[in-house]
Image (cartoon, rainbow, N blue to C red):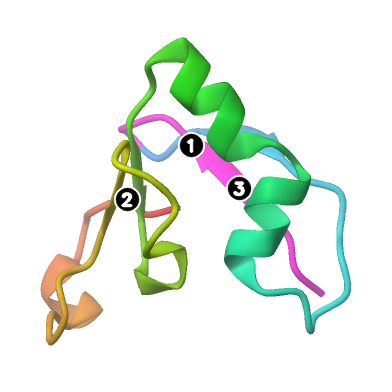
């Protein structure tokens, strides 16, 4: 199952997507639910993991070689 979550900077859940099949790529799921388009239109920056690379200039992803274990306490999409 693939479920997308949108949170505020403090990690509070703002929206949970309907479930898609687990084989759905994260970026495809985000596009299906129009998360990227809505955030871009609203000027809301997106912090996401590497599965979202290439999503657009308003999406910030983990740098290559960066371990999420180094991100304790950070909120990610």
- Tag 2 residue: 75
The quarter of the image holding the N terminus is bottom right
C-beta proximity under 8 Å, tags 2 and 1: yes
C-beta proximity under 8 Å, tags 1 and 3: yes
Q: Is residue 31 above or below residue 23?
A: above
x, y (%) of residue 47? 32, 47
Label 2 Cα neighbours within 10 Å, binned few <14 / some 14-19 / many ≥20:
some
Label 3 Cα neighbours within 10 Å, binned few <14 / some 14-19 / many ≥20:
some
Label 1 Cα neighbours within 10 Å, binned few <14 / some 14-19 / many ≥20:
some
At numbered mark 2, what does the secondary structure look like: helix, strand or loop? loop
Residues in magenta?
1-10
Q: CA distance from mark 1 to mark 3?
A: 6 Å
In the picture, measured across the screen, residue 75 lies left or right of residue 40, that is left
Q: CA distance from mark 2 to mark 1?
A: 8 Å
At numbered mark 3, what does the secondary structure look like: helix, strand or loop? strand
Question: Residue placed at 48% from the left, 36% from the top?
Answer: 7
x, y (%) of residue 23? 79, 84
- Tag 1 residue: 7
Q: Which is more N-terminal, label 1 or label 2?
A: 1
x, y (%) of residue 22? 80, 80
- Tag 3 residue: 5
């Amino acid at each position: 199952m693939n479920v997308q979550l949108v949170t505020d900077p403090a990690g509070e859940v703002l929206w949970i997507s309907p479930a898609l099949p687990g084989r759905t790529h994260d970026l495809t799921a985000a596009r299906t639910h129009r998360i990227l388009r809505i955030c871009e239109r609203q000027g809301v920056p997106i912090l996401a993991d590497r599965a979202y690379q290439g999503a657009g200039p308003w999406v910030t992803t983990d740098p290559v070689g960066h371990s999420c274990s180094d991100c304790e306490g950070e909120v990610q999409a």
